[in-house]
Amino acid sequence: MPHTTQPQTNAPAAEGLTTTEREQISRRARALWQEEGFPQGRDRELWAQAELQVLKGRTAVRDGR
C-alpha cells in the first residue's frame, strides 16, 4: 500500500482566519488532494488553492453575489 499524507493545515496564510474558515479550507484542501491523486509535496499549493476558493465564496456571499 503506498504511503500517503494529508495536506498540512498550518499554512502561513491561515493566520487571521476564523476557526470555521480554517476548517472549510482544510476540508477543501483535502478534497483537492484526493482529486489530484494524493500528490506528495504540494501541500502549500493545494492549501492556497483551497483558501482562494473558500475566501472567494465568502466574499461573493458578503457582496450579495
Image (cartoon, helix red, strand yellow):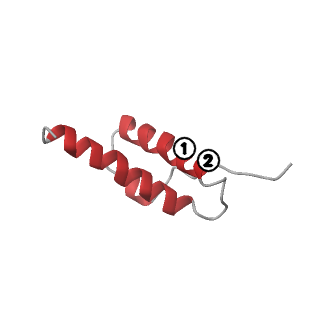
Identified at 30% across, 48% down, the residue is 55
Q: Nearer the viewer, residue 24 or 39?
A: 39
Residue 48 vs 21, above or below: the answer is: below
Residue 8 located left or right of residue 39: left
Quarter of the image holding residue 43? Answer: bottom right
Res 18 label: none
As measured in the structure, the alpha-carbon distance from the residue carrying label 2 to the one carrying label 1 is: 5 Å
Which disc is residue 34 wearing? 2
Mark 2 packing: few (<14 Cα in 10 Å), some, or many (20+)? Answer: few
Q: Residues within 10 Å of mark 1 (few under 14, many from 20)?
A: some
Residue 22: % across, % down? 41, 42
Residue 9, placed above or below residue 18: below
Say whether residue 56 is left or right of residue 27: left
The residue under label 2 is which amino acid type?
A: Gln
Q: Which residue is mark 1?
A: 31
* Residue 31 occupies quadrant: top right
User: Could you tell me which residue is drawn at 42 percent across and 38 percent down?
Assistant: 24
Is there a contact, CB below 8 Å, between mark 2 and mark 1?
Answer: yes
**Residue at point 33%, 39% (across, down):** 18
Q: Secondary structure at mark 1?
A: helix
Residue 54 at x, y percent in the picture? 35, 45
The amino acid sitting under disc 1 is Ala
- At mark 2, the secondary structure is helix
Q: Is residue 24 left or right of residue 41?
A: left
